[in-house]
Image (tube, helix red, strand yellow):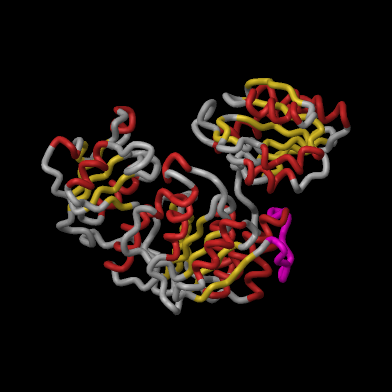
Amino acid sequence: MSAFPSSIFSGRRFAVVGLGKNGLPAAQALTAMGANVVAWDDNPAARADAAGLDLRDPADKEFDFDALVLSPGIPHRLPEPHPIATRAIKADVPILSDTELLFQAVRAAGSRARFAGITGTNGKSTTTALLAHILNTAGIPVAAGANLGPPALSLPLLPHDGVYVLEMSSYMLERLVTLRFDAAAMLNLSTDHIDRHGDMAGYAMAKRAIFDRQLATDLAVIGIDDPNSREMAAWLTTRPAQVVYVSGVWRPFRLGPALPGSHNAQNAAAAVEMAQFLGASNVAIEAALLTYPGLPHRQQRIVTSDGVTFVNDSKATNAEAAACALVCYDRLIWIAGGMAKEGGIEPLLPLFPRIARALLIGRDAPVLAATLARHHVPFDIVGSLDAAVPAAFNAARATGTPVVLLSPACASWDQFTGYDQRGDRFAAAARALHAGDA
């Protein structure tokens, strides 16, 4: 692993808009690679953190850039395009993601390192981290990031035998033009991000872009445990890449404690298929599956106090993700709520009998409460996570329930900066209870 040469993008001009966790590293990396970069964020606080960059609104001058690098969270079409995106489209300037520019930089540096891309409505972070863990265990040079962890342009230059393992959101996939994944996986597909894609068909179209430009020598992995994925699998048979189907019933290797449930069996199946294709031995794969440590906020066991285990699954921002956690426990106290997705928690109806009591937080707690009330699930609207954790602990002890599960089935933006802050708050509250109970 090494740094990129400082002249790779010499003479090229980029506008970078949105200086958050993707945009700021992108602007800094492109500058270090010799590009002429104009950087901007509508938020003055974000601009204050970008010292040393050429901070100017690109819309204030003739739009003569080679590309606009637009942070994933900023829309370029729906629900309403950012003005700078409209300007770029009018000027016929491509709108790219930082993952696209990583690919261009790697190839411009002369490296033949391979690219593995993973997407899906749920499970893509776990599968990305697991695949990287397997390849590292196998001694294959690897760098993982993009939507998970380090932004793409902060990753190092890998040698010819290296592999970039990239978690790809639908927002990132919309902004690729040359990136080809040697191995690509689409795990599952359920309703999400409809505001950005217009409808389910638009969302599916964005997701299947992970297979664009693949060749007959490449690998395409597709989940078949949901109808939308099966439909995409049928389409994949018309494409040139080798197609492998994965399911949650897969069990050729033993899985470690950080991979509970059939959803993680499917995640592991995808990671194993990709790892084998990329050269990992079965010995390394088996060892890695047993030693994989898991990711924060994905069924993360925090502490057990007075016989009650607190589980942080804050990453479950929709009902389908929450179902993957609920199904792992026979009886639980459930903490849920926030900003509900389309369909709310109705898809969880078959799992309601497992819920001894629900503690509801956030903006749409009344919406979730109405659903629970219709199905006679006991609940309390407590408003905040700080109130929910002790209330859940008391309910668990009163009913002899062994698990308190934070798996919100909702986005977190109403009360937190993201699911990670929500999960950290839950973990801190659980540990504080344990310390007080010890």
Can the viewer see residue 435? Answer: no
Q: Main secondary structure of the magenta part?
A: loop
> In this rendering, does residue 432 appear at all?
yes
Q: What is the residue that sits farthest to the bottom in this orientation?
A: 217
Q: Position of residue 413 (x, y in %)?
A: 51, 31
Q: Position of residue 32 (x, y in %)?
A: 25, 53
Question: For this rendering, which residue is in front, 159 or 153?
Answer: 153
Image vertical order of residue 30 relative to residue 55, above or below: below
Q: Is residue 382 left or right of residue 318?
A: right
In-front residue for pair 305/272 = 272
Task: Name which residue lies at 60% across and 25% down.
Answer: 362
Task: Answer with the quarter of the image where residue 23 lies.
Answer: top left
Residue 350 in picture, x, y percent from top left: 76, 43
Which residue range is magenta in the image?
248-260
- Residue at 26 percent of width and 62 percent of height: 5
How many numbered callouts? 0
Residue 36 is situated, as x and y percent measured from the top left of the image, at 18, 50
- On whether residue 135 falls in the magenta region, the answer is no
Q: Residue furthest left?
A: 62
Q: Is residue 226 left or right of residue 183?
A: right
Which sits in the foreground, 232 or 53? 232
Residue appearing at x 71%, y 69% in the figure:
253
In this rendering, the answer to whether 280 lies above or below 194 is below
Q: Is residue 302 above or below residue 128?
A: above
Tell me if residue 254 is in the magenta stretch.
yes
- Above or below 93: residue 55: above
* 382 with respect to 3 (left or right): right
Please state, as top left, top right, bottom left or bottom right, where the N terminus lies in the image.
bottom left
